[in-house]
Amino acid sequence: MKSFIQRLTMTVFAVIALQITFANLPVIAQDNGPEGYCIPKQWFTDNYVGGKFSAYYYCYPDYPKLYPESYLDASGAAITYVKITAKNNPSEVILYRSTGEDYNGDETFCYAYMSNDYDGSGQFTPGDEYDIEIGVQGHSWEYSWGYSQCDYSGSYYYTVITTRLFFDWTRDGDWIDVAPASEYVQWWDCRISGNYCLSNVFTGTFKVPEDVDPGKTRLRITAASDGYSLLPTSNRQDPCRTDYFYSYDYGSYGYAYAYQYGETEDYLVEFIIPIKGTFPEAGDVLFAQRDYDGTPKEIDEVMEEFPRPNVELRDAAQPGMKLTYRIRGPLPAKDIVYTGLDPKGNAQFDLSKPFNTKTPKLFEFIKSTGSYTTGAGEVNFAQSGEYYVELELYLPGKTTPKYMTKRFSVSWANDLSIQGISNPMKCYITDAKPFLKRY
């Protein structure tokens, strides 16, 4: 049996080991968001700390404070505010935070995770466009000189302020994916001559891809001063770097230095469209003149499923999110041949109120109206051709609907013209009245 001293010693070493391990881990969200995002110095720590390199990482102005006799000032860039509004409704603030401009000389300045500590809903709708403003304050901190380091005479004195926007569309804990759209969203540069301490406002517009999955995710904004834009393009797209980097490799040993002249801020946000799927689904090929009523049927000696029209949610909907389900066609006609109704007979229903409490995310219609139904929720397509499901969705508190359409085909059992079609349609969301689009 181990003695008390031995057990105590082992415990102390275990705690130290855990502290060392946790110190090098990436930031982990404690708010149901994705995990694993890098912090600005993580790439440096992972690649150079603990190896043959003597590695040094500095969040300015720490470095000049360490060596005030040689380095009397430090330039930098601080994010002063971030504002994102809906493109089609500028008064709708999605995210706003005034983050200040104090360069306080420790790593909490160089990296900050804001979580959802901001004004606005933080909720983004797939397919929508948004305007963004980022305020950045250039700085030059002086330590022992008796006058300001902001002003210089002559246009040959200049600095470059650089700002970047990253958005984790795939919600997988990084900002490096290129589909459904590049997560390296936008880059801004501003060359400042004569004064290092000017305020800058960078503006732009971005669109949330239409096929992102609902849920929590992060956006990252970085600001840096002095030449980061001169680095290779591949480094510009690196969300973990806002710094100068130098390495000296002498074979058996080396030195590595990273100097961060700016700030990185992460924000927790959310995609909010809750619809996972429908029946019919985009690309389906269905039988004509057969009842899709939830009862399996034999077709050419094979039992086939014939589901009722339905809508399935990914996550529970927020109160006030309302939906209308229609089927239109056959094209080129756009006649409404089917409308799904809730159990009370309403065409528009609240997605936060399940039809069946045993399956709260599945809205299967048992009532309906239209020329292709008897009113019991089923659908029977009288003609072959192409049709589409039209979902008219009102987000909570909104007066303008969003539309999702899913195009599918209806065929007779042995119609050769329809055989072999695979995924001919695309589902998308738009603020405008729906139109149809092929792959």
Image (cartoon, helix red, strand yellow):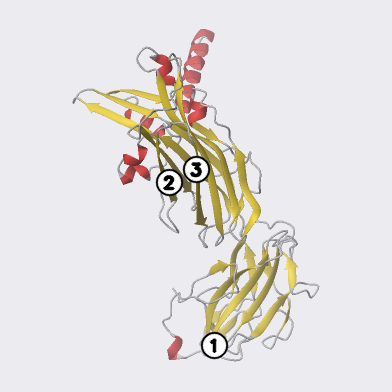
Instruction: Name the element at disc 2.
Output: strand
Disc 3 and disc 2 in contact, CB within 8 angstroms: no
Q: Residue furthest left?
A: 251
Q: Where in the figure is residue 427, as x and y percent of width and height? A: 52, 70
Residue at mark 1 to residue at mark 2: CA–CA distance:
45 Å
Residue drawn at point x = 56 percent, y = 55 percent? 130
Instruction: Name the element at disc 1.
Output: loop
Marking on residue 196: none
Q: Residue furthest right?
A: 344
Q: Earlier in the sequence, mark 3 or mark 2?
A: 2
Say above or below: 402 vs 183. below
Q: Is residue 400 left or right of residue 215?
A: right
- Identify which residue, 287 or 42, lies in the foreground: 42
Q: Amino acid at mark 2?
A: Trp
Instruction: Name the element at disc 3.
Output: strand
The residue tagged 1 is 332
Whether residue 287 is visible to the viewer of this picture, yes or no, is: yes
Q: Is residue 215 left or right of residue 191?
A: right
Q: Where in the figure is residue 65, as x and y percent of width and height? A: 43, 16
State the count of labels. Answer: 3
Q: Is residue 316 left or right of residue 189?
A: right
